[in-house]
Image (tube, rainbow, N blue to C red):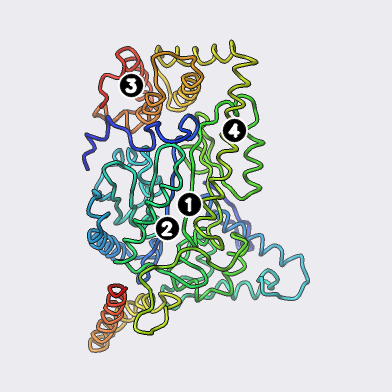
Amino acid sequence: MEFEVLKTSVGEWLKGTGPESDIVMSSRVRLARNLAHYPFVGRASETERSEIEGFLRSHLKKTSVGSRLEYTNLGGLEDLDRQFLVERQLISREHADATGARGVAIDPTEQISLMINEEDHLRIQCIHSGLDLEAVWSQIRGVDEEIEEVVPYAFHGQWGYLTACPTNVGTGIRVSVMLHLPALVITRQIDKVFRSLHKISLAVRGLYGEGSQAFGDFYQISNQITLGRTEDELIAQVADVVPVLIDYERRAREFLLQETERNVHDQVSRAFGILRTAQTISAEETMQLLSRVRMGVLLGLVDDLHVSDVNKLLVRTQPAHLQKMKGVDLDTKDRNIERARFLRSYFESGSPDDN
Amino acid sequence: MFHITEVEDGGVRELHLCEDHARVYLNQAEADSQQEDSDIPSGPLGVNQTAKELSEIDQLFCDMCGITFFEFRNQGRLGCPHDYVQFEKELEPLIANIHGEVQHRGRRPRRRKSFEGEPLPESTEELTSVIGMRKEIRHAVEAEEYERAGKLRDDIQNILHKWNAEASRN
């Protein structure tokens, strides 16, 4: 894979375009699928894992979608390169950290990625910028149907598509939408919102990491149930709640502007000030500050900066991206220095090395 | 990541599970503990078994991949597609607990359209039986029963060819 090209570009989900992209960062659907004639990945021998990888790789090439994708053998990559793919949301952290035969096929726009030998034999992912679940579903459905013609998926009349973990069985679908909700965080309404989401069986996670704390006010909302409902119903369950959350966030932003404009303006300006002048800065602090600045841009409190710039910086200041740009491995301390240097030069020269 | 410490008769057991797997594990643990303080007779939900019955369930194993129910409970992951058939009775209450439903209503494999009057296969169990046949081949080779091993290889090829033929005929 041409990582040299990727390192100064950002993927589809950070373009900052698409409907409601002031609040909705991205829409994603993934499908969990397994071959009928092999044990699940966790139970497969080393030989079987290689056979599964070989089988899927060769059969995916027979599909029109598969022939457009670029395949990367993850076992043959450096840790840094795997981390780089995690930061771009093209593979999961588990997939990066696993051992044995495994790989990922990615399309040039980074909308589609096919993970081979993750927890399931095949994980199909499709991601678009903004709120675009219907288009994502229609695209991933097409990919799934094409693969299904050449690959025998494990299927059972009662249980549906069979998965290694019973939490995914049935449709094998995970529908998620990533939202930027800074005003709900500032006005302390976010916990209330999450409690009500849990009540309707929706899960909330941070941008990076499993159920961990969300850095920078970015939250992923996704379905938990996968069995007993159709894909359309499960997508609607997530899609129906998003406009409500958008409305809450917009109202909270308006409230902040009306009631505390000076405070908000002050917070945004200070965040921007730190990003432009810091000499050392952690990834977490950078995300928090970029989140504030992103809100400031959208509220018209920051000039000369676009939402897409902030989105790009969110990924390009991640540890593996920084190191790939610099071309050397850096420890945490040096990364924090390099991150601050990168941010200063970015804001001074107005994104010098962008394409 | 969830770190769960189980205190058992024999000592302490540490488990490290991701959120989803922890949910499976804890659901099962909840079902286990419910049976302890309940004297309702054993029901279809599998939450009222005695400790003896539970330990018997733990010893159940899959004919294809060999995973025991105990191993599944520890890892939160099944061994192969056949487990859903082999452990159906044990899995059903767990799945009902997670999803609130026990019948798939979503998409079905498209290629499995019936042809020439043959009914639509309800599952891919025949293909999954290949997993057990590969194991038999290994045993046959160890026992130097090469003829049997060769026959099994042919059987596997036939099953895969049959699928390919069906797949290409829709």
For the residues carrying marks 4 and 3, which lies nearer the camera in this image? 4
Helix or strand or loop: what does disc 2 sit on? Answer: strand
Q: CA distance from mark 1 to mark 3?
A: 36 Å
The label shown at residue A174 is: 1
Q: Residue sitting at 53 percent across and 30 percent down?
A: A217
Q: CA distance from mark 4 to mark 3?
A: 38 Å
The residue where tag 2 is placed is A32
Q: Label 4 is placed on what type of residue? A: Asp
Helix or strand or loop: what does disc 1 sit on? Answer: strand
As displayed, is residue A224 above or below residue A157?
A: above
| Residue contact between numbered discs 2 and 1, judged by CB atoms under 8 Å | yes
| Residue contact between numbered discs 1 and 3, judged by CB atoms under 8 Å | no
Q: Residue sitting at 59 percent across and 69 percent down?
A: B92
- Tell me residue A240's x, y (percent): 57, 45
- Tell me residue B16's x, y (percent): 51, 51
Q: Earlier in the sequence, mark 4 or mark 1?
A: 1
| Residue contact between numbered discs 4 and 1, judged by CB atoms under 8 Å | no
The residue where tag 3 is placed is A338
The label shown at residue B161 is: none
The residue where tag 4 is placed is A247
| Residue contact between numbered discs 2 and 3, judged by CB atoms under 8 Å | no
- What chain does mark 1 sit on? A
